[in-house]
Image (cartoon, rainbow, N blue to C red):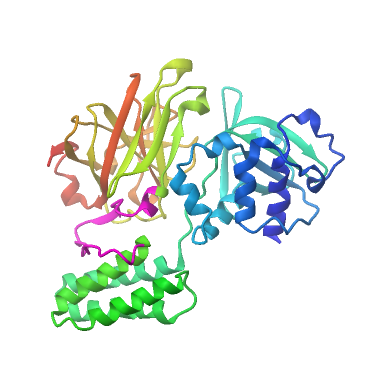
């Protein structure tokens, strides 16, 4: 029923912006007519297989991103979402834009958050008279239908990424296998890894294509010919990484995790790049830009900062499962910048309008550096204003990178890896170290 309700709400987004054109007498279905401003959204709804399920009385509140909002998402990500493999994530994103119940703009102003049909929360705030929903600003509010209300927003709202069943299985195998390998039991590590991989070949509850299963089966047969058990463990780990990255046909270089650190991002896979999204000063009326791209094995964040309209910042953000940093006390990133000063941030959630904890670091133009940031030294900020307070590593549910140095001009930050490290590493430095 939630998917049916979702379609009802989303099809209203085909109408033009003007609230005066919606008299409130027509239902959501009646108002669902073609419009040039929501072509991408219509394509997304069709690709998600939701068009035929138009039924239900509502009421619903729909936050409608325009074509311009979708243009902020890079083309590779859009193509992934419109593919068969991206279908679950696309449906989740669409449901993330719809709330059960009728909430006009005056009702939204009085709330801190609303729950969506995806089971996620959209955080609400007001900045200089503009309603902010998640990371989007409402451009046109209170388009009324007999069974709902629509608010037009200036960007696509991205929920926390769905965890694929195959990734859950393989991540659990890695978590069990790595300590066995590092403790001198590669045979036991191999047993854990191959059990998980064979489950993918034989099972039906995982979203692997027939060709991927065939490729994996062949790679396992070839691996069985290996006589060096340590090399076999590495081979199995390479297969696990290839499945997670959706790249079974390309041989990967497996990395057995060291117990001294926990890798959060390596960016060898475009899937990890897609987990990040930009947050610009447009929510404050600014004109800065920013985009995210995948450069082989790194993430590139680049754009232009503008000081017009009290702007001046560009940022990108991702969510993390809670307790991802539990037991660690520092973040370590390997980056190549342009000589400008950047900010590494952490937060209790991935939503906008909430506290963030910052640590500034300088870059050396064109040079790779490693930045180690003790979490306890990160400063609490709210919309750029410094406040008292600290964040515990176990509370971190999101990470940010900001360019916010009160300077106008182009910027470019390339990120190779993000690792959580324990106190023995964190005490080394708070700043930069050349590689």
Q: Quadrant of the C terminus?
A: top left
Determine the residue positioned at 54% across, 40% down. 70
Quick check: 391 left or right of 58? left
Q: Is residue 338 left or right of residue 34?
A: left
Q: Is residue 168 left or right of residue 101?
A: left
Assess whether residue 263 is covered by the magenta stretch. yes
Q: Magenta part of the protein: which range?
A: 247-273
* Rendering coords of residue 345 (x, y %): 35, 38
In this picture, is 93 found above or below 25? below
Q: Residue at x 35, y 47 (%)?
A: 392
* Circle count: 0
Quick check: can you spot residue 309?
Answer: yes
Q: Nearer the viewer, residue 307 or 181?
A: 307
* Residue 266 placement (x, y as % from top left): 28, 52
Q: Look at the image and tell me in which quarter the N terminus lies.
A: bottom right
Q: Foreground residue, 430 or 343?
A: 343
- Report if residue 116 is visible in the image: no
Q: Quadrant of residue 241?
A: bottom left
Q: Residue at x 81, y 53 (%)?
A: 57
**Which quadrant of the view contains residue 269?**
bottom left
User: Residue 423, position in %: x, y?
Assistant: 20, 50
């Amino acid at each position: 029923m939630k998917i049916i309700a979702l379609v009802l709400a989303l099809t209203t987004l085909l109408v033009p912006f003007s609230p005066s054109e919606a008299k409130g007498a027509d239902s959501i279905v009646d108002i669902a007519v073609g419009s040039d401003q929501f072509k991408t959204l219509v394509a997304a709804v069709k690709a998600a297989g939701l068009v035929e399920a138009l039924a239900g009385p509502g009421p619903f509140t729909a936050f409608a991103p325009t074509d311009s909002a979708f243009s902020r998402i890079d083309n590779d990500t859009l193509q992934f979402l419109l593919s068969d493999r991206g279908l679950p994530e696309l449906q989740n994103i669409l449901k993330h834009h719809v709330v059960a119940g009728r909430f006009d703009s005056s009702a939204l102003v009085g709330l801190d958050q609303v729950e969506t049909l995806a089971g996620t929360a959209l955080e609400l705030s007001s900045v200089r008279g503009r309603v902010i929903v998640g990371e989007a600003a409402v451009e046109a509010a209170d388009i009324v239908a007999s069974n709902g209300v629509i608010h037009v927003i200036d960007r696509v709202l991205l929920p926390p990424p769905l965890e694929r069943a195959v990734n859950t299985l393989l991540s659990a195998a890695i978590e069990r296998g790595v300590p066995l390998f590092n403790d001198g039991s590669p045979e036991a590590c191999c047993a854990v890894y191959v059990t998980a991989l064979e489950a993918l070949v034989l099972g039906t509850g995982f979203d692997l294509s027939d060709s991927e299963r065939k490729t994996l089966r062949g790679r396992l047969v070839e691996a069985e010919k290996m006589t060096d058990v340590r090399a076999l463990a590495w081979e199995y780990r390479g297969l696990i990484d290839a499945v997670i990255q959706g790249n079974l046909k390309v041989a990967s270089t497996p990395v057995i995790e060291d117990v001294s650190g926990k890798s959060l991002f390596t960016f060898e896979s475009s899937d990890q790049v897609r987990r990040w999204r930009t947050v610009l000063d447009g929510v404050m009326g600014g004109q800065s830009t920013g985009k995210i791209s995948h450069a082989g094995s790194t993430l590139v964040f680049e754009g232009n900062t503008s000081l017009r309209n009290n702007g001046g910042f560009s940022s990108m953000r991702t969510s993390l499962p809670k307790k991802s940093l539990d037991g660690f006390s520092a973040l370590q990133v390997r980056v190549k910048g342009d000589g400008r000063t950047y900010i590494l941030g952490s937060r209790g959630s991935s939503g906008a309008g909430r506290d963030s904890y910052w640590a500034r670091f300088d870059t050396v133009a064109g040079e790779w550096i490693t930045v180690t940031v003790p979490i306890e030294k990160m400063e609490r900020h709210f919309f750029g204003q410094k406040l008292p307070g600290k964040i515990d590593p176990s509370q971190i549910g999101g990470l940010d990178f900001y360019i916010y140095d009160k300077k106008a001009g182009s910027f470019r930050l390339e990120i190779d890896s993000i690792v959580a490290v324990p106190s023995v590493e964190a005490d080394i430095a708070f700043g930069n170290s050349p590689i």
